[in-house]
Amino acid sequence: MNSGRLSGRVALVTGAGSGIGRAISQALARDGATVVVSDLDLDLAKQVSNILAGSFPIQLDVTSMESAKQAVSRIERELGPIDVLVNNAGVSTMAPIWDLTEKEWDFNFDVNAKGVFIVTQAVLPGMMERKRGAIVNTASMAGKKGVPLLAHYAASKWACIGFTKSCAVEVGPYGIRVNCVCPGYVATSMQERELIWEAEARGMSVENVTAEYISKTPLGRMQVPEDVARVVAYLASDDAEFLTGAAIDITGGAHLT
């Protein structure tokens, strides 16, 4: 059902080809937004766009300033001003700190932290000129607590939260709101890989690791991407017009701050 609360607005979603990004794109489209489905993998972006009326697929490498600027320029030329940016693109790997490689560290930070900065910086000039806009970043529960085997990933998500709060302070006077969401144990393809990695590292079965995750979640189930998407759609809308600088836990109670 289309609530219409985002009608007439253009929304750019990064990492939208699967998982949480796909669900966010669907939620924004249901609320009436014209959604730009962006992903490093253009084929994945096209697959999502094909099921969303009025959406547009685009290839975007969030680690490249040039790619971000070209994408933003094309979107604003062909569709109009970007009203909503969702920095959702994210990656993860797993390793104990003593085995963690510099390549893994850089990979996580390049996408999860620098990527948020790059695309935000590309979109901000237009939003600042128009004195309006909503930015939502996908952080993580891991950005608020210590997580074994994910020190590099957690550090990148702490950086995402810090950037969100600092950006909110700087651009608030321009009428731009910046928030982030902090999902917990989300059932996605990335989570499936992490379950396998963690099970191997801890000498457990995937089923036992999953059961452990659920046991840590007071609401008693694994999270699904739609749980995150609904909150993102709210933050993108005028329903959240006085909410900025927030890092919202969407964890079913697995993490409480």
Image (cartoon, rainbow, N blue to C red):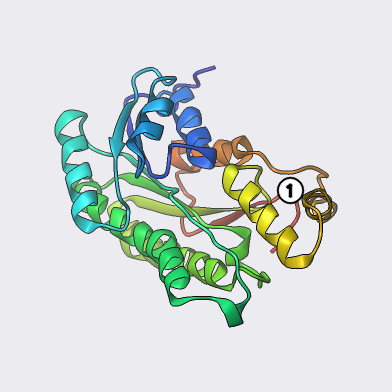
The C terminus - image quarter:
bottom right
Q: Horizontally, is 73 left or right of 40 in the view? A: left
For residue 84, side relative to residue 183 (left or right): left
Position of residue 119 in the picture relative to residue 107 (left or right): left
What residue is disc 1 on? 252
Query: Can you give x and y, in whole percent of width and height, for residue 211 in the image?
Result: 83, 50
Secondary structure of the residue carrying numbered label 1: loop
Tell me residue 242's x, y (percent): 47, 49
Hey, which residue is sitting farthest bottom in the picture?
Answer: 98
Q: Is residue 201 placed above or below 190 in the rendered structure?
A: below
In the displayed structure, 202 sits above or below 235; it is below
Q: Would you identify the image quadrant in which residue 113 lies?
A: bottom left
Which residue is drawn at the image coordinates 49% and 19% (left, top)?
A: 2
Quarter residue 173 falls in: bottom left
Measured as percent of width and height from the top left, residue 34 is found at 34, 27
- The residue that appears at 60% across and 39% down in the rendered structure is 225
**Residue 165 visible, this angle:** no
Determine the residue positioned at 42% across, 21% down: 52
Report the front residue among 175 and 158: 158
Q: How many numbered dots are placed on residues in this image?
A: 1
Picture quarter with the N terminus: top right
Q: Is residue 84 visible?
A: yes
Residue at screen point 45% across, 27% down? 5
Which x, y percent locates residue 224?
66, 39
Label 1 crowd (10 A; few <14 / some 14-19 / many >=20): many
Name the amino acid, label 1.
Gly
